[in-house]
């Protein structure tokens, strides 16, 4: 087993490094005043420091369920929500509750998911087209996918593609893990119906407050039918008993007193500006980097037409105090690639321009 490349990079980064590597939300947008107010309110209640339900506190699960019903138009009750310690924990919980050994993933795919699958010794197969998916997916196997602003590729499924995936899952009688970490970060505020709304019986929909409120709180959730929730609840109890009571109550109190979607809209507006500025810098200084501007999320993804191995470039760039993620780590077989992922949410305009210009010199 190896550590996550991105986590190792984050450990190596110091205050002088220009980092396009991690999926870090912009700290300037954290609702500090509102969170501070919520924390004072929560700490007046001694139960905030006590053990709590393994499935999560009722009021927070109720809010998340209402969100699914109202925004996704997917009728949901609090009994169909389980709170997790970050969305990352959901992979471990779900996989330990199922007997399936085979996992089908998009190529490329999220490095954190691949790490979870590997450490549990699952057999991983990849697909690039829905025809390939249809050919390799078997009964009771697991499909893992990101339907909105995929990490790393930034691709988003159309409604037709979502329905097609759902039909394949129904035909094969397989499981779905749908990762929705970025689904609310559309630059125009448009939210698409998830795949699980077309295929509910054997699906898990993963959400998180990490990208929309604050990642340090480590509060995420799984949405699934009651039968599946009961199975994963047993696993959750064995891992950490429950997610931090205080952090759950903090988020719950924040949601009571603030408009979450107003905050998300503010973030998305800021991120669109940052994305466009990075794209303009790339087009000016890195003309050999080919990419499409994303419509949401936190990354720009593309390929270098003048180099073969972006891992070598990433190593040299880190020596010059610039970090980005080479695509090799997003392929389960770690194939050499000229592709790369850049985070645009964390750096200011000055750092972005400087970092891209340093990369331009290295690629020459």
Image (cartoon, rainbow, N blue to C red):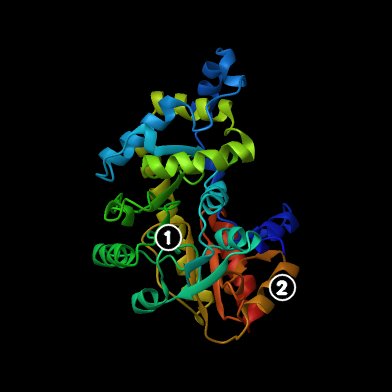
Label 2 secondary element: helix
Is residue 266 visible to us here?
no
Percent position (x, y) of residue 108?
50, 71
Residue for point 41% across, 70% down: 138
49 relative position to 281: left or right:
right
The residue identified by callout 2 is 315
Q: Where is residue 162 drawn, in percent x and y?
A: 29, 63
Count of labels in the image: 2
Q: Tell me the quarter of the image containing the N terminus.
A: bottom right
Q: Residues within 10 Å of mark 2 (few under 14, many from 20)?
A: some
Name the one closer to the observer, 267 or 159: 159
Q: Residues within 10 Å of mark 1 (few under 14, many from 20)?
A: many
Placement of 135 over or under 99, stated as above or below: below
Q: Nearer the viewer, residue 55 or 115?
A: 55
Q: Residue at x 35, y 36 (%)?
A: 65
Q: Is residue 300 visible?
A: yes
Mark 2 and mark 1 in contact (Cβ < 8 Å)? no
From the top left corner, tell me how far across and down residue 41 is, in percent: 52, 16
Q: CA distance from mark 1 to mark 2?
A: 28 Å
Q: Which one is closest to the eye, mark 1 or mark 2?
A: 1
User: Which residue is at a point 39% across and 62% down the rendered structure image?
Assistant: 174
Q: Earlier in the sequence, mark 1 or mark 2?
A: 1
Residue 284 or 165: which is nearer the viewer?
165
In this rendering, would 198 be left or right of 271? left
Q: Secondary structure at mark 1?
A: loop
Q: Position of residue 22 (x, y in %)?
A: 60, 57
Rendered image: mark on residue 209:
none
In the rendered image, the quadrant that contains the C terminus is bottom right
Residue underneath mark 1: 146
């Amino acid at each position: 087993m190896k550590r996550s490349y991105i986590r190792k990079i984050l450990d190596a980064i110091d205050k002088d490094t220009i980092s396009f590597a991690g999926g870090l939300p912009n700290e300037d947008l954290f609702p500090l005043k509102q969170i501070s107010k919520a924390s004072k309110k929560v700490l007046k209640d001694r139960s905030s420091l006590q053990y709590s339900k393994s499935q999560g506190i009722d009021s927070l699960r109720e809010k998340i369920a209402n969100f699914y019903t109202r925004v996704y138009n997917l009728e949901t009750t609090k009994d169909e929500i389980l709170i997790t310690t970050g969305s990352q924990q959901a992979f471990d919980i779900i996989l330990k509750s199922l007997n399936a050994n085979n996992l089908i993933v998009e190529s490329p795919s999220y490095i954190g998911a691949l790490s979870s699958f590997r450490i549990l010794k699952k057999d991983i197969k990849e697909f690039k087209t829905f025809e390939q998916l249809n050919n390799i997916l078997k009964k009771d196997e697991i499909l893992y996918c990101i339907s909105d602003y995929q990490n790393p590729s930034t691709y988003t499924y159309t409604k037709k593609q979502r329905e097609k995936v759902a039909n394949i899952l129904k035909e094969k009688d397989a499981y779905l893990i749908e990762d929705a970490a970025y689904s609310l970060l559309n630059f125009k505020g448009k939210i698409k119906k998830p795949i699980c709304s077309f295929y509910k019986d054997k699906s898990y929909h993963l959400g998180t407050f990490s990208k929309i409120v604050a990642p340090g709180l480590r509060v995420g959730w799984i949405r699934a039918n009651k039968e599946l929730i009961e199975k994963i609840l047993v696993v959750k109890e064995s891992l950490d008993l429950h997610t931090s009571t205080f952090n759950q109550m903090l988020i719950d109190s924040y949601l009571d007193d603030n408009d979450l979607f107003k905050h998300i809209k503010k973030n998305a507006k800021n991120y669109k500006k940052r994305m466009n500025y990075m794209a303009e810098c790339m087009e000016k200084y890195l003309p050999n980097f080919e990419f499409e501007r994303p419509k949401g999320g936190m990354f720009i993804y593309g390929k270098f037409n003048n180099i073969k191995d972006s891992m070598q470039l990433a190593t040299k760039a880190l020596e010059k105090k610039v970090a980005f993620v080479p695509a090799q780590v997003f392929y389960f077989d770690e194939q050499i690639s000229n592709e790369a992922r850049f985070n645009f949410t964390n750096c200011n305009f000055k750092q972005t321009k400087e970092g891209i210009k340093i990369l331009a010199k290295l690629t020459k």
